[in-house]
Image (cartoon, helix red, strand yellow):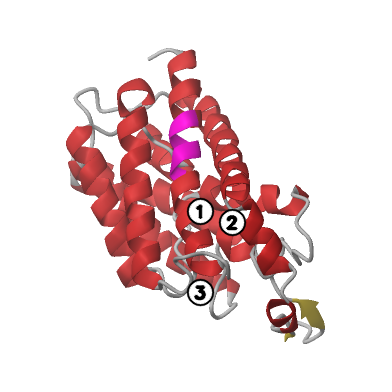
Amino acid sequence: MSSSDIFIGETIGTAILILLGGGVCAAVTLKASKAKDAGWLAVTFGWGFAVLTGAYLAGGVSGAHLNPAVTIGLAIEGGTKWSDVPLYLASQLLGAMIGAVLVWLTYLGQFKAHLTDPEILAAQPMEEGLVDQKAAPKAGPVLGVFSTGPEIRNYAQNVLTEIIATVVLVLAILTQGLNDDGNGLGTLGALITALVVVSIGLSLGGPTGYAINPVRDLGPRIVHSVLPLPNKGSSDWAYAWVPVAGPLIGGAIAGGLYNLAFK
């Protein structure tokens, strides 16, 4: 697998993943969307189908990691060369940012209508800080379209939730989803992974919104912070390390567990 294959496959595949996944979040969040308030089932299945589409598109090119946690797990397992890891991660982050920009462009009118609606803006109170109890700005009214956030902000619990969910994802990929070369997802593996993502969303996604993918959260959060969205509010950078650290730790644990238990 060449460097250009990795770059092209991971950039395009991750962009499609975020376009469709962020798209379903926009669809159920933005006031002028036909899918407004469609609910958690729509979100979980939307993300599952997003993974399926991105993985099918990139599988034959780069192995469709689309997730640094998967890349780290595969490197520890031995299917991916450590020398390829930086390129995988950089391509995934770029793709995630491109996908987030495409979500913004797709829902441009809806973002403007939502963020200038007096009722929406009035519903954005201050929340109490958990450590010093000083008032802190709440995450902006559309940040959930781009990035995850906890229902109960407890960093230790939030990180643990992301670790557990990511271990499930990466173990499922390593045990059932690899292609013949063992360096990424095969056709059946893409389907299995999509179903696992739906299961994780339904069962483990409630506490944190189940990032289970560092670039799925970080790339769109960066885009949210720079887009010219009126009244967009905070990008909640105080929380941003959780959906990066948790999945990376979970991916590493899954790779180690696979080597211990399944090889």
Q: Which circle's residue, 1 or 3, is located before the other in the chain? A: 1
User: Are dots 1 and 2 in contact, CB under 8 Å?
Assistant: yes
Under circle 3, the secondary element is helix
Within-10-Å neighbours for mark 2: few <14, some 14–19, many 20+: many
The front one of 112 and 133 is 112
Q: Which mark is residue 33?
A: none
Mark 1 neighbour density, 10 Å: few (under 14) some (14–19) many (20 or more): many
Label 2 element class: helix
Q: Which residue in the protein does label 1 denote?
A: 22
Count of numbered labels shown in the rendering = 3
Q: Residues within 10 Å of mark 3 (few under 14, many from 20)?
A: some
Residue that badge 3 annotates:
157
Mark sitting earlier along the chain (1/2): 1
Q: Residue 199 appears in which quarter of the rendering?
A: bottom left
Question: What amino acid is labelled 1 in the image?
Answer: Gly
User: Measured from the top left, where is residue 152 in percent x and y?
Assistant: 55, 81
Q: What residue lies at 44% left-to-right and 48% top-to-bottom?
A: 20
Q: Is residue 44 above or below residue 54?
A: below
Marks 3 and 2 sit apart, C-alpha to C-alpha, by 22 Å
Q: Nearer the viewer, residue 218 or 251?
A: 218
User: Along the horizontal axis of the image, is 116 left or right of 42?
Assistant: right
